[in-house]
Image (cartoon, grey):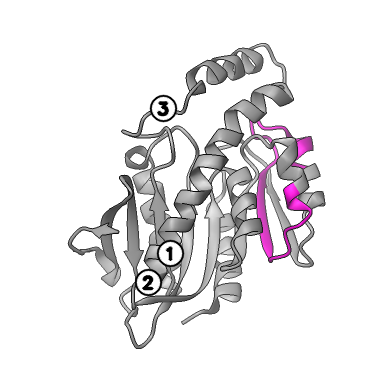
Amino acid sequence: MDLSAARPLAGGITEREFTLDAVPGILWTPARASASAPVPLILLGQPGGIGLRRMYPALAARARSAAADGIATVTLELPGAGQRPPLPGADAVRAELRQALAAGEQPTEEVIDRLILPLVEAGVPEWQRTLDAVLGLPEIGGRVGVSGGVIAMGVRLALVDSRIAAAGLFAGSFVPRTTLAEARRVRIPLHVLLQWDDEGNDRGRALELFDAFGSPEKTLYANMGGHTGVPAFAGADAARFFARHLGRR
């Protein structure tokens, strides 16, 4: 991991950009983090195809919220986003998706698979390598959470990486059938946010996914409104979920 010099932010938070295997990312660390008192970590997901720079204000706000609870956060540039090369066939499948939505139709299972699964297959190993590197820092340690981003990627991470202790997922992206099958084997605590009137999102599939999760503790947090209409208090509830399961310092 090639870490840049630390940049102090308001509230004593430290921000460091990095690259790992040519993948850019950002690490935020609360002031109280130290080798003698390492802090837990949240992996901050983001939507596919938008890019780290455009998402920075929202990501930094989430990082500040987590830091207030003594939790470090890290995010990555997703495959095909920002300055990274596009995933093969991504432009064509996005055009098919837009065409279906413009016609008032739900995209087919084949389109959803072609849109989401390559992102999951490429992105999850990158997250795991990043987790290896960040947990190697002396001031980061303890439990790990996953927050937001492409829900199929969060499900895969929750299933395959035993270091992840809790996940806060946003039911705002398309769900392949294979993700439903994976969800049945997930056992960690879950906090799932659903915007009831999310344009373009299949509410029925989102509810089916929530029902499929095998976790003994799972909460569905639904609000009225569209994709970008998440109320501010929803973030506070998600923060309490992570503070409870990752350990407030």
Q: Disc 3 designates what residue? A: 86
Q: Quadrant of the N terminus?
A: bottom left
Confirm or deny contact between disc 3 and disc 1 (CB under 8 A). no
Q: Disc 2 designates what residue? A: 136
Residue 15's label in the rendered image is none
Instruction: Measure how far apart labels 3 and 1 are at the Cα level.
Output: 25 Å
* Residue at the image point whose x is 48% and y is 57% from the top: 128
* Residue at the image point whose x is 63% and y is 39% from the top: 225
Instruction: Measure how far apart labels 3 and 2 are at the Cα level.
Output: 30 Å
Lower sequence index among marks 3 and 2: 3
Instruction: Measure how far apart labels 1 and 2 are at the Cα level.
Output: 6 Å
Q: Is residue 205 magenta?
A: yes
Lower sequence index among marks 3 and 1: 3
Q: Is residue 63 above or below residue 105?
A: below
Span shown in magenta:
182-207
Q: Is residue 26 magenta?
A: no
* Residue at the image point whose x is 61% and y is 65% from the top: 166
Q: Disc 1 designates what residue? A: 132
Three-letter code, disc 1? Asp
Q: Residues within 10 Å of mark 2 (few under 14, many from 20)?
A: few
Q: Secondary structure at mark 1?
A: helix
Q: Looking at the image, how many numbered discs can be counted on the residues?
A: 3
Q: Secondary structure at mark 2?
A: loop
Three-letter code, disc 2? Gly
> Residue 214: where, in percent of width, then height?
79, 59
Q: Nearer the viewer, residue 187 or 50?
A: 187
Q: Secondary structure at mark 3?
A: loop
Confirm or deny contact between disc 1 and disc 2 (CB under 8 A). yes
Q: Nearer the viewer, residue 200 or 16?
A: 16
Most distant residue in the bottom direction? 36
Q: Quadrant of residue 50?
A: top left
